[in-house]
Amino acid sequence: MRSVSALNINPADRRARVIVISGGTDGMGRALALARADRGDHVIAIGNDREKGGRLLADAPGHARAGLIEFLPADLSTLAGMQAVVSTIRSRYSAVDALALFANRVSAKRIVTEDGLERTFALYYLARYVLGHGLAPLLRQSPSPVIVNVAGVGVQKGAIHWDDLQLERHYGAVAAQLQAGRANDLLGVLHAEQMGGTIPYILYHPGFTKSGDLSQLPMAVRLIIGALSRVFAQPVGKAIAPIHDFIDTPPGLPLSAIDRNRSLPLGLATLDPDAARRLGRVTADLLAKLGYAG
């Protein structure tokens, strides 16, 4: 296993950390990966596109040669891909300091994964559940661990479709995104309750940002979003700026909810503890049926 000293990082330097980033080859995840490597951190960027992974390493050749940034290919929409990532990181590292969760993909049509799951639910929610739980033992080995879940906390629209989690009856791209977003809100609540504050969890909504892969959306929708983005969207660098603070100085609270620059009250209806426990039970049952060995 690699330790801080094995990476030639000065243990006295608080900025030197091991950081895992899902969705690390696109948008905000990619920007964070490059920025943290610039600061001397060791970054594991997870992505399913090997070409994008190659471009990430090519854009940081010095960091790649120095071992400060690596690309870990995986399809996080599948349970096998999720478990492979956890297993690989556990075998290579004795500790992880930060887990930043970005991976998501908008789909105009309902796509079913090899596990029989609706892809948005699998990639945007379930993978974050599995990575957070699977890497928790390594995060506990860090003196200042943190998980940053980049989703839509603060948004009140959307709901968990308890009787149709896989949206078999009424799929829509917006409905799928909102459901997974609300599930991530509850995931933060569940994590904080289960971990007892040993690994601070931050739900972070960056707001409208010039980021993300829209290639699977209809051309008309892409044109509209592109036009709006040019006028209203913030640059990626501004969106990830607070995440540097979260990593460098994790909060002392078990759970924090940040909507852009505003701290939100944890009493929001979308952060209901009973709903979080219910989702936790449903998720555990689902993973058990899929043969998950957590």
Image: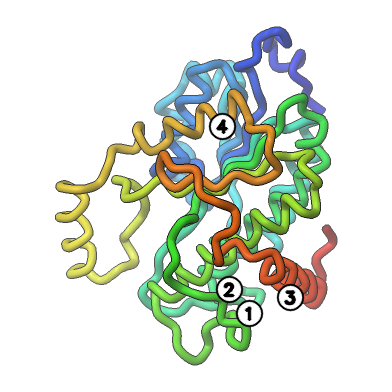
Residue 72 in view, yes or no: no
Q: Which residue is mark 3?
A: 282
Q: Residues within 10 Å of mark 2 (few under 14, many from 20)?
A: some
**Which numbered marker is on residue 116?**
1
Closer to viewer: mark 2 or mark 4: 4
State which mark lies toward you, 3 or 1.
3
| Residue 113 image label | 2
Secondary structure under tag 2 reads loop
- Above/below status of 103 relative to 186: above
Q: Amino acid at mark 1?
A: Gly
The residue at the point 53 percent across, 52 percent down is: 48
What amino acid type is highlighted by mark number 4? Phe
User: In the orientation shown, which residue stands out farthest toward the bottom?
Assistant: 169
How far apart marks 4 and 3 lie (CA) works out to: 30 Å
Q: Which label's residue is closer to the chain start, 2 or 3?
A: 2
In this rendering, the answer to whether 231 lies above or below 61 is below
Question: Do the residues under discs 1 and 2 have CB atoms within 8 angstroms?
Answer: yes
Q: Earlier in the sequence, mark 2 or mark 4?
A: 2
Q: Is residue 87 left or right of residue 10?
A: right
The amino acid type found where label 3 is placed reads: Val
